[in-house]
Amino acid sequence: MTLEVKDLSFDYPDKNILSDISFKVDEGDFLCILGTNGTGKSTLLKLMLGILKIQKGEILIDGISSKKFKEYKDIAYVSQKATGFNQDFPATVYEVVAAGLYSRRGFLKFPRKSDRKKIEKALEMVGMFELKDRLIGRLSGGQQQRVFIAKAIVSSPKMIFLDEPTVGIDVNAVDSICCLLGDLNKQGYTIIMVTHDLSSVIHHSNKILMLSENEPCRMFDTNEFLNQNYSSQYPHHKEGH
Amino acid sequence: MEIFTYGFIQRAFIVGFFISVMTPMIGNIIVLKRLSSVGDALSHASLAGVAIGLCFSYSPVVVAVLFSCLAALGIEYFRRFFPRYSEISTTLVLSLGVGLAAVFSGFVKNAAGFNSFLFGSIVAISPAETLAVTLLSVMVIIISLLLYRELFYIAFDEEGAALSGVKVKTINFVFTLLTAIVVSVSARTVGALVISSLMVIPVACAMIISKSYRSNIIYSVIFAVIFTTAGLVISCFWDIAPGGTIVLIGIAALILLLPFRRK
Ligand SMILES: Nc1ncnc2c1ncn2[C@@H]1O[C@H](COP(=O)(O)OP(=O)(O)OP(=O)(O)O)[C@@H](O)[C@H]1O
Ligand SMILES: [Mg+2]
C-alpha cells in the first residue's frame, strides 16, 4: 500500500498549519514524522486518515484520491490520546483488542469464529497474550500502549499510523515498543509514526519527515539524515541496522 | 402465599422482571459514559410530562414518554457546548424538569395519581401496560445486544470509535431515545424518583466484583433482578412502596459487597 501527499495545505479557522506539503510513502516504509509541538503533525495524520477534510492539495492512497478511498479497514490508527481512557473502566485486554475488529466492519455485523484466533494472534505479537483476561486499567502505561497496538493490528491492516505512541513510558518500554514496530515493519506493515523520541526509533525507520513552523517541510532518508545533521546527537546509531 | 395468585401481583412481578433486565443494560452504558445523572434528568422530565398530562387530561404515560424524549434530545444538544463537562447539560435539563413538574403539579386535581408516579405503584399496572412494558423491554434488550460492540466502543473511547468508523452520532441518538423510553415507562411501576437508582445501583454493585465488560453487564442484570424481586415480595407482604424498597435493598447489598472489591 502506498501513500502520496501532493501540495497539501491546511488552515484551522484562526491559523495556517500546513502549507504545500508533498511527500511519498512506499510499501514497506517506516516513516517518522518529526516537529516541535503545534507544527501540525497530528493534523497531518488526521488528513491522511480522512478524519479531517482536505482543503487544498491531494492525498493519494494506492493511487486513489483519499476522497474516494473506501478500504479504510486496511488502515489502522493509534491516536495520541489512546491511553487517556478512564482507568477504572471494566474491560479486559481481550475486549479492548476485539473493538479493533468490529469498528470498520460496519453496522450490525456479528463476530465470527475466526475473530478469536485473530485477537489471540495480535496479542501474541505484542507479547500481551498472558495478560489477555486482565482489566485494561490495571496494566502499566507501556503495557496499555502494546494493547492499543494489538487493537490496531488485529484487523490485519496494511498501513499503521501512530501518533506519539511512546509518550509517558519508561525508556525500556519505549525501546521494546519501537522494536515491536520495527518487527511489524519487517513483516511487511507500512508504518507512519509521529514521535518526539527519535533516538529510540530512528534505527528502525527508513524515512524521516521534518515539519517546522514557517518553513517548508523536508523529507530525508534515515541514513542521509543521520550523516547530514544529527550524527553527533545520535552517536549510538550503527550503520546498516 | 395466596397473595401471589392475584392477577395484579403477578403482573407486578412480570413487569418488575422485565424492567430489571432492561434497565441495567442501559444503565451500564450510562454509568460507564459517566452520565449517571442522565436517568435523574430524564425521570424528572417525565414527571413534568405526567403533571402536564394529568392537568390537561391527556394520557400521563404518553406525555411522559414525549417529555422524556425531548429532554434526552435537550441533553445531547447542551452537551455539545460543554463536551467535557456533560453534567452541566444534565443538570440544566433536570432543573427544567423539576421546575415544570413543580409548577404544573399544583394544578393536578388527582394528587394520588401523581404520587403513584413518584414512588411507583404495583397495584396500578393494567394488563395492557404489562404487555406494553414486556414488548418494550424485549425491544430494548434486543437493540442493546445488537449494538453491544458499538456501545462498548463508544463508552470506552468515543473519539476512537468515531475515528475508526463507528456511527457514533446515530448510535448515541438511538441510545438516548431508548433511555428516555425506558425511564418514562418504568416510572409508572418503580417510580420516577427511583428509576435512575435502578439504572445505577446494580451497575455499581457489578463494578465492585466484575472482571470484564461482559461480566459487568451480566452481574448488573442479576443484581437488578434480585433487588427487584426481593423488593416486590417485601412490599407485597408489608404493603410498602415497591420503588423505595427496591432501592434500599440495592444500597444495602452495595454496602455489603464493598469488602469484596476486586483487587
Ligand atoms: N480543532 C482545532 N481547532 C483549531 N486549532 C487547532 C485544532 N486542533 C489543533 N489546532 C492547532 O493546530 C496546530 C497544530 O496542531 P497539531 O495537533 O496538529 O500539532 P502537533 O504537531 O500534533 O503537536 P503536538 O506535538 O503537541 O502533538 C496547533 O497550533 C493547534 O493549536
Ligand atoms: Mg500531536
Image (cartoon, coloured by chain):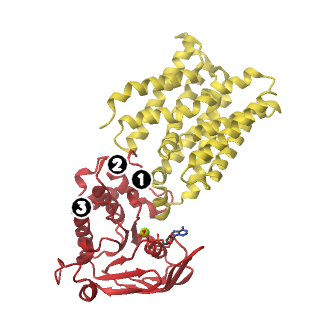
Chain colours: A red, B yellow
Mark seen at residue A137: 2
Q: Chain of mark 3?
A: A
User: Residue drawn 41% across and 55% down?
Assistant: A84
* Nearer-the-camera pick, B180 or B204: B204
Label 2 near label 3: C-beta < 8 Å?
Answer: no
Q: Is residue A118 visible?
A: no
Mark seen at residue B151: none
Q: Is residue A94 visible?
A: yes
Residue where numbered disc 3 is placed? A173
For the residue marked with disc 2, what is the amino acid? Answer: Gly
User: Residue drawn 26% across and 64% down?
Assistant: A174
Q: Quadrant of ligand 2?
A: bottom left
- Residue, far front: A232
Is ligand 1 closer than 8 angstroms to the Cβ of mark 3? no
The secondary element bearing badge 1 is classed as loop
Query: To which quarter of the image does residue A220 belong?
Result: bottom left
